[in-house]
Image (cartoon, rainbow, N blue to C red):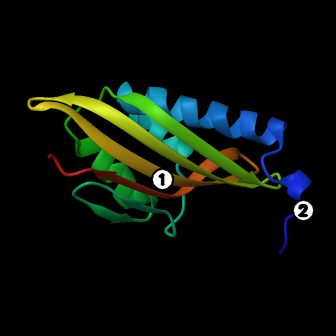
């Protein structure tokens, strides 16, 4: 499938994905597990790689979210790059910082979003932190 340039980063689609991503961000930092579960595709094919975990399928992701320590979830987005392709697929890359015992830590997050009948859902995600200097 080829994308014509006018189908990449259409303003209306970028706005929709940005709204979904900001909803995700609020749920993440507020430990709103129900909304986080809603925003991930309910499928065995959903994948989330985290700083210490490799999760396959919505059930594993949900179990991780429910058992995770809700402390220190606040973070600040330093940079956000969203790229949409047509009306139904997007990538989001976030660079964020979080306060830690040793100062500020830098992390990154990549997500693939797909529009389904129920709305935009994360189908794949990866979160990692830069090593401390």
Q: Is residue 35 visible?
A: no
The residue where tag 2 is placed is 4
Q: Position of residue 107 (x, y in %)?
A: 32, 44
Give the residue at the far front of this rendering: 133
Closer to viewer: mark 1 or mark 2: 2
Q: Where is residue 7 in the image (x, y as percent from the top left)?
A: 87, 54
Q: Is residue 95 left or right of residue 105?
A: right
Q: Can residue 30 be seen in this view?
A: yes
Residue 110 has which mark?
A: 1
* Mark 2 crowdedness (10 Å alpha carbons): few <14, some 14-19, many ≥20: few
**Callout 2 secondary element:** loop
Q: Position of residue 4 (x, y in %)?
A: 90, 62
Q: Residue at x 82, y 51 (%)?
A: 87
Which of the two discs, 1 and 2, labels the residue nearer the N terminus?
2
Q: Nearer the viewer, residue 132 or 126?
A: 132
Instruction: In the rendered view, tell whether residue 68 sits above or below residue 29.
Output: below
Q: Where is residue 47 in the image (x, y as percent from the top left)?
A: 45, 64
């Amino acid at each position: 499938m080829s994308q014509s340039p006018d189908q990449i980063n259409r303003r209306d689609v970028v706005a929709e994905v940005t709204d979904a991503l900001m909803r995700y961000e609020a749920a993440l930092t507020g430990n709103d597990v129900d909304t986080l579960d809603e925003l991930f595709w309910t499928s065995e094919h959903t994948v989330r790689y985290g700083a210490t975990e490799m999760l396959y399928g919505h059930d594993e992701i949900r179990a991780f979210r429910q058992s995770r320590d809700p402390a220190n979830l606040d973070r600040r987005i330093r940079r956000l790059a969203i790229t949409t392709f047509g009306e139904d697929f997007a990538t989001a890359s976030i660079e964020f910082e979080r306060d830690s015992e040793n100062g500020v830590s830098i992390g990154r997050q990549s997500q693939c979003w797909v529009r389904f009948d129920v709305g935009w859902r994360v189908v794949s995600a990866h979160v990692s932190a830069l090593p401390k200097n």
